[in-house]
């Protein structure tokens, strides 16, 4: 019952002809609180999620949805969908942490009955559905996939802040381990979609589609980040260049350039490249026996992992900009007070998984700075991802004035709406500094206004000011 499972469950529960949807949630110390909340019709997801809570309340009141930690109830189901996190233990050796997913698969396998459909919605290494997942389900159930039960992959394509809309309106990729499994998955997902269409393919093709679409997005962001770094070095404004490139239109020409910034976070772009890389590595190993090999320029790195490295570099770039700006104000990083604005990885959300703010927080603290973290959405009381979990408030405040008080530098990491309205004179007064510093990692402030108010300004891609 997370960002994917909750919206998916309530949408299924609102489909005529679907008698009941069980939302399975382990009664763990960190997440068990969700069970009672959901059964009261309350969403545990903070942040703006249009339509989610009213729909949840509706299906709870209608009795078509309930949340339970009792996995034996799986045996009563016709279909089971797994939306479980699949993080990476260590990208360097391309090893994912499939422990939570394997736990889920074992629960399903132990309660699997003939004729059931099992769908993996988690983003997984290509080859996992027909490989590891099939093996565990068959081992636990004694049944055969593709004969006694159907097995498919139907990757989620949601973004926080628009969960319901994304599920209803995005086309849905579904892929079975064999044609009947694909048909069953098409049958399951079609009623949930409004404008979206179901796109059937094989399970492995569906896995590659999902990992590749996030890898390509990450690659496009890396291209924008590299160009922004180049623009800074050449003293030009990335946003002028972007508008210029974007002007080449017509005849089907699109030059879509994404946005540079303080880094790439979240549960998806930060790991899906490695799932794709691992998939081709495993496939290449398996294919060696058949003398098929991956044909790729000898000794050259993967374009995709290079893109990961560039995007992972951006928090360090933010620190370099902070240090340079403090230097211009006659201060050092060590001993400086920094107000870090934005702990969530994406604007107007409470989702702080793999936030780019974290490596900056750690590096600035290690360099002797005192870093105060502010976020209007991430609740220190419930968020699993906090700057200093050992501190009473987790090292995070939702009080902006408290974060800005006495700050030598203000560093913007997330494009929350709350930061677009910052008034330089107010921030200067709160900082109490003669020459405070502002470092904008999301291009949310107007440099001229801040420089006029006496700030040293630095911004990602803003070479004309840096
Ligand atoms: N970001 C940039 N520049 C951009 C766009 C994003 O720096 O131009 C940063 C964001 O600030 C954020 C990170 O990248 O830190 C990820 O942002 P995102 O907008 O990609 O948000 P996600 O990761 O929640 O959503 C992606 C989406 N994937 C694609 O569009 C291909 C979404 O459709 C997927 O459902 C989601 O991953 C997922 O769950 O896989």
Image (spheres, grey):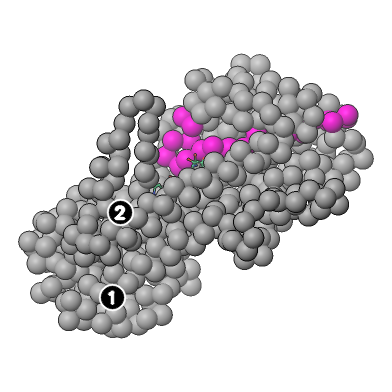
Q: Position of residue 265 (x, y in %)?
A: 46, 55
On screen, 180 above or below 459? above
Q: Residues within 10 Å of mark 1 (few under 14, many from 20)?
A: many
On screen, 191 above or below 23? above
Q: Position of residue 109 (x, y in %)?
A: 82, 42
CB of residue at label 2: within 8 Å of ligand 1?
yes
Q: Is residue 158 magenta?
A: yes
Name the residue located 29 percent from the left edge and 79 percent from the top edge: 333
Q: CA distance from mark 1 to mark 2?
A: 18 Å
Q: Which residue is mark 1?
A: 323
Q: Position of residue 144 (x, y in %)?
A: 89, 35
Q: Could you say which is closer to the camera, residue 285 or residue 2?
A: 285
Give the mark nearer the N terminus: 1 vs 2: 1
Quadrant in the picture for residue 338: bottom left
Q: Is residue 76 magenta?
A: no
Q: Is residue 355 left or right of residue 231?
A: right
**Quadrant assignment for the N terminus:** top right
Highlighted magenta segment, given as a residue range: 146-166
Q: How many marks?
A: 2
Q: Is residue 144 left or right of residue 372?
A: right
Name the residue located 79 percent from the left edge and 29 percent from the top edge: 178
Q: Could you say which is closer to the camera, residue 230 or residue 340?
A: 230
Label of residue 184 in the image = none
Q: Please, what secondary structure does the residue beneath circle 1 have?
A: helix
Quadrant in the picture for residue 436: bottom left
Q: Name, please, the residue furthest toward the left.
A: 452
Q: Which residue is mark 2?
A: 442
């Amino acid at each position: 019952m997370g960002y994917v499972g909750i919206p998916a469950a309530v949408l299924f529960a609102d489909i005529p002809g679907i008698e009941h949807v069980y939302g399975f949630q382990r009664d763990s110390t960190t997440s068990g609180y969700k069970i009672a909340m959901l059964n009261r019709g309350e969403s545990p997801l903070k942040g703006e999620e249009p339509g989610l809570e009213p729909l949840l309340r509706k299906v709870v009141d209608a009795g078509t949805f309930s949340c339970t930690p009792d996995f034996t109830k799986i045996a009563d189901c016709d279909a089971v969908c797994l939306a479980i996190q699949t993080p990476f233990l260590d990208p360097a050796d391309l090893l994912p942490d499939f422990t939570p997913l394997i736990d889920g698969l074992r629960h399903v396998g132990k309660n699997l009955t003939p004729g059931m459909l099992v769908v993996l919605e988690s983003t997984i290494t290509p080859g996992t559905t027909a490989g590891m997942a099939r093996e565990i389900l068959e081992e636990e159930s004694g049944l055969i996939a593709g004969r006694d039960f159907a097995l498919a992959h139907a990757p989620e394509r949601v973004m926080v802040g628009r969960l319901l809309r994304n599920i209803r309106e995005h086309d849905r990729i579904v892929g079975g381990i064999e044609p009947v499994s694909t048909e069953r998955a098409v049958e399951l997902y079609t009623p949930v979609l409004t404008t979206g269409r179901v796109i059937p393919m094989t399970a492995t093709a569906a896995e590659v589609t999902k990992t590749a679409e996030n890898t390509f997005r990450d690659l496009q962001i890396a291209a924008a980040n590299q160009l922004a770094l180049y623009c800074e070095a050449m003293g030009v404004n990335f946003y002028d260049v972007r508008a210029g490139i974007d002007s080449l239109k017509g005849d089907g020409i699109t030059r879509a350039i994404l946005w540079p910034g303080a880094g790439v976070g979240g549960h998806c772009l930060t790991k899906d490249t490695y799932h794709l890389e691992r998939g081709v590595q495993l496939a290449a190993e398996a294919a060696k026996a058949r003398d098929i090999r991956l044909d790729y320029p000898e000794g050259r790195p993967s374009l995709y992992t290079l893109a990961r490295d560039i995007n992972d570099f951006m928090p360090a770039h933010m620190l370099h900009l902070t240090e340079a700006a403090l230097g211009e104000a006659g201060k050092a990083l060590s001993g400086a007070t920094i107000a870090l604005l934005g702990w969530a990885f994406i604007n107007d959300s409470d989702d702080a998984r793999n936030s780019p703010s974290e490596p900056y927080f750690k590096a600035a603290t290690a360099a002797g700075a005192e870093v105060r973290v502010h976020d209007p959405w991430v609740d220190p009381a419930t968020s699993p991802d906090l700057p200093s979990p050992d501190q009473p408030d987790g090292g995070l405040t939702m009080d902006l004035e408290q974060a800005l008080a006495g700050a030598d530098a203000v560093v913007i990491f997330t494009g929350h709406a709350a930061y677009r309205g910052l008034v330089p004179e107010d921030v200067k007064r709160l900082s109490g500094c003669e020459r405070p510093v502002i470092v904008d990692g999301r291009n949310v402030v107007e440099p001229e206004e801040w420089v006029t108010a006496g700030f040293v300004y630095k911004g990602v891609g803003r070479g004309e000011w840096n």
